[in-house]
Image (cartoon, rainbow, N blue to C red):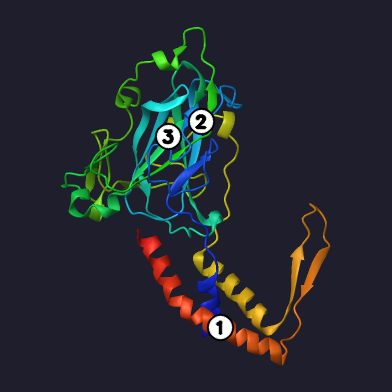
Amino acid sequence: MTLLQLLLLAAVPLPAHSHSRWECPAPRSSSTGIKNGPCGSQPLSLYQTDAATDEIKPGPLRIIFEESIHHTGSPFRISLSNDGTDDDACVLLDHIPHNDCCRPGFFDESSYTKYVVTIEIPNVKCERCSLHLSNPMTDKIGSDGSPSGIGCTDPDGSCFSVYYSCTEPFRIVGDENAVQRNEYSCPDWRSVHEDWPLVWVGDNGEDVDVTTSGVYRRESSIWSEDDFTLTTVPNQYRQDAGGLCGEQVTATITSPTAIAETTATTASNLTSGTTTTTPTAKEGNNESNESKTPPPTSAGIVVASSLIIRIMILAGAIIFGLQSLISF
């Protein structure tokens, strides 16, 4: 890769994504960088009474979330909101371990690490409920995050860096024995999921205790590369429960190297003049639209040289900012 290609690659605008978000049910915000919990600037109270179009039944529900920047050992927690408000959420499943296998590229959504889990929705009636995802960054708490460390607490605790995502509102249609969500008394999630593991893998492969809800250390385990489910839990957490998110989960993983090579090729085409072929948007149409870039003229070379100088001046600042974003 030439110096010019590297500079052009560094100058490519990057979307403001980082860390984790819901995939299904659909998230309220496409951002994965929300740090003001539980739901950022889109509280459930802003939605109209009839805003919920999806219906969910009590019982097993397959859910999907994804990570856009790798944070070693940083676990997840899933909660259910109250009716029409994000307050008084019930923890449905805690200490969901991190998948340390992958290094997603935050500017390439197809590379995001998927997580698929089947949770249990309580028998309630709710007109505007939502699922909350919390992701404490235990990779940033040093020795406190080790198996023998004190960990950090969340919500409203000592975990100073936490990322959040909330789903769009949905209705829960309970049976004849269901209670209203705002009258539902949240049980301890461990009493519902007694078979959820009590230890995960911590630093240096050591066991890390995860028996206390809301206290987090670096917690990891093994997730399937085929269906993105957690391989170290009972089958009930891996089963496809159907419903809203029950379709086959697929993903096309694009490595950061391939992304860089593609971008560099585009940069090379811009400077050397080539013919690029772009498929038409019409499905099943094998025709293509050709966009030809003429060879550079003398005037074009002068303009390009000026552009290169400007890019070189900005490249250092861009790269520094990108490194800071990824490390945080």
Label 2 with label 3: CB-CB less than 8 Å:
no
- At numbered mark 3, what does the secondary structure look like: helix, strand or loop? strand
Q: Eyeballing the image, is 183 above or below 29?
A: above
Q: Position of residue 96 (x, y in %)?
A: 36, 39
> In the image, which disc is placed on residue 100?
none
Q: Is residue 42 visible?
A: yes
Inspect the image, locate mark 3, and give the three-letter code of the amino acid beneath it.
His
Callout 2 environment at 10 Å: few (<14), some (14 to 19), or many (20+)? Answer: few
Of tags 1 and 3, the one toward the viewer is 1
The residue beneath circle 1 is 308
The residue beneath circle 3 is 132
Q: Is residue 2 visible?
A: no
Q: From the viewer's perspective, tell me whether residue 100 is left or right of residue 9.
A: left
Q: Nearer the viewer, residue 263 or 248?
A: 263
The tag earlier along the polypeptide, 1 or 3, is: 3
The tag earlier along the polypeptide, 1 or 2, is: 2
Q: Eyeballing the image, is 140 above or below 272?
A: above
Inspect the image, locate mark 1, and give the three-letter code of the amino acid beneath it.
Ile
Instruction: Report how far apart the C-alphas of labels 1 and 3 lie in the structure.
Output: 45 Å
